[in-house]
Amino acid sequence: MDIRNFVIIAHIDHGKSTLADRFLELTSSVQQRNMKEQYLDQMDLERERGITIKMQPVAMEYKLKDVNYKLNLIDTPGHVDFSYEVSRSLAAVEGAILLVDASSGIQAQTVAHLQVASEQGLTIIPAINKIDLPQAQVKEVEEEILNLFLNLGLELEEVYKVSAKTGEGVEKLIEAIIRKVPSPQAKITQNASGTDSHQSLKALIFDSVYDEYKGVIAHIRVVAGSIRQDDKILFMASRAVSDVKEVGVFKPQLVTTSQLSAGDIGYIVSGVKSVEGAPIGDTITSKQNPTETSIPGYKQPQPVVFSTIYPTAESDYEEMKTAFEKLKLNDASLYFEPEHSPILGRGLKAGFLGMLHMEIIVERIKREHNLELVITAPSVSYKVKLTNKKQLDVFSPAQYPDPAEIEETLEPWVLLRIIVPPGYINNVMNLLKNKRGVYKDTEYLSAERVRINYETPLSEIIEDFYNQLKNTTSGFGSMAYEMLGPREAQVVKLDILLAGDEIPSLSRLVVKEKAESEGRRLVEKIKQVIPREQFAVAIQATIGGKIVARETKPAARKDVTAGLYGGDVTRKKKQLQKQKKGKGRLKEQGKVQISSSTMLKIFS
């Protein structure tokens, strides 16, 4: 059977999952009674949010001119935080549908994914979706796609017009995939003696999931040879050896088959129980007849946002750690290591690809493992060069060294690409002017779309920038960014004191020029959420011992005169004076205890 391997790439909300639904219907891959919207989005979180979080492969069959074709589709995420998922899926296919919304046109993440696909030499088929909408601007969007292809030096034969909702034009798009995307060819390698060794198994692990009973289920693309149940295989990077317990394909449910051959996309169950034994990007080969060269794997993704996560009950720490380990099995970008706080106890320092990635991981752990978590304020990783010539990677205030020992501090910068209609340029520029960045240029992609290129520190955009951009552009703005590397920064440690005692869990690293404003914001937030004590609590933000912001939480006060009826006013004064002295003694000796629930409110 002739094979075509392809992905759908697009910006978030441009209709990838809906188009995949129509492909499933057209190829009769799913019975009509079982069909539902966003069929390939298997997680509850994906269906609730209307976004794709995990790539999902599916094998379909289609007959054209009496020839049967196997179509292996990988549905990919669209959000910038999940670009690593897209890059992995692109390495497993020969073609890509570039899907663009007819009403919103080219978006920032569309361009980012297209550049990666073109660099990998994939056949790219552009398609305009949602042509049935009244506000569709098909001609204008077609012009944008044409300009984009010209700028990237790509050939463009035809732009396909479809409605994933109604099915219009979808059959023509499937036939274009069959005609234009090349059939996968077994890659031939020459061994040392020069003889042909293309029969040696060579398969790429592009994703994996963990099953309580089966262990690690590796999603693979077979490049050469074939793989069957009971074969003895070798994982080339980890050097682990295992027997194949099950092979199969995605329908999209797991369906066992007799074997997977060159060009196939499917899965294997090998009994491996840890991510170290079958890492994403590894090459699987035969133990008896191994290939000599591995498939180029994936560049290890570098987390850019860091936070420390604690269970609300310290007894849940081991369960939380186990939950993180299971999620890491199919998310190589997730990083974590143990951490301890005097207030919150044992926790994990965790690294993420962005704020949405962090939000999804935390939500999955809460739902799938029924755990309540406390999350500290997110931070980026700073490179600190010391006077003794050592260099540290610092992403928490507890790691920050004495300023006297610091020679230079570097923070990560990004190239931010924002695409908006021309009428919103001033709004975006006003938003960017307080981000400590450098304006580069503005490119006109078409009469309806411009791209603003701006260099800025990563710390300026990790928390709420995406929402601010959507608000200031009435929802029309989109963004993507790429790492530029570290640049010098003046970073200080902002400490928080409650009743004179430093609270390490509330400290954070901030740039010097924004330290005072951040200090004021933080003490005001703390004043709002901490419960009242029997004495007035001074809330102070300090930098190197210097107070930069202060608020006072008033004492909880009991009406000590409530039981006095009439009589001499001096009796009331005497009671109030006695209360005042007691409050004074409490203020001198009292300690403020912050509960985990209060800490959660501060960081929310």
Image (spheres, rainbow, N blue to C red):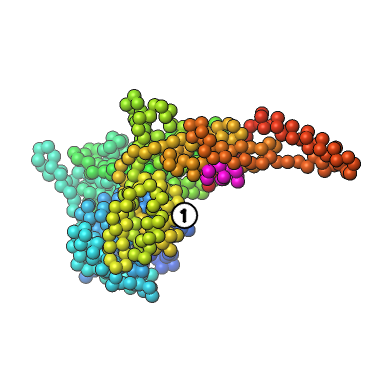
Query: Is 524 covered by the magenta stretch?
Result: yes
Which residue occupies 49% across, 41% down? Answer: 516
**116 or 369, which is in the foreground?**
116
Circle 1 Cα neighbour tier, 10 Å, few/some/many (<14 / 14–19 / ≥20): some
Amino acid at circle 1: Leu
Farthest residue toward the top?
388
Residue receiving disc 1? 45
Residue 395 image position (x, y, % from top left)? 42, 37
Query: Is 493 covered by the magenta stretch?
Result: no
Residue 398 image position (x, y, % from top left)? 46, 32
> From which residue to which does the magenta span run?
520-529
**21 or 123, which is in the foreground?**
123
Residue 409 image position (x, y, % from top left)? 36, 35
Q: Is residue 265 visible?
A: no
Q: Is residue 596 left or right of residue 579?
A: left
Task: Name the chief secondary structure element in magenta.
Answer: helix
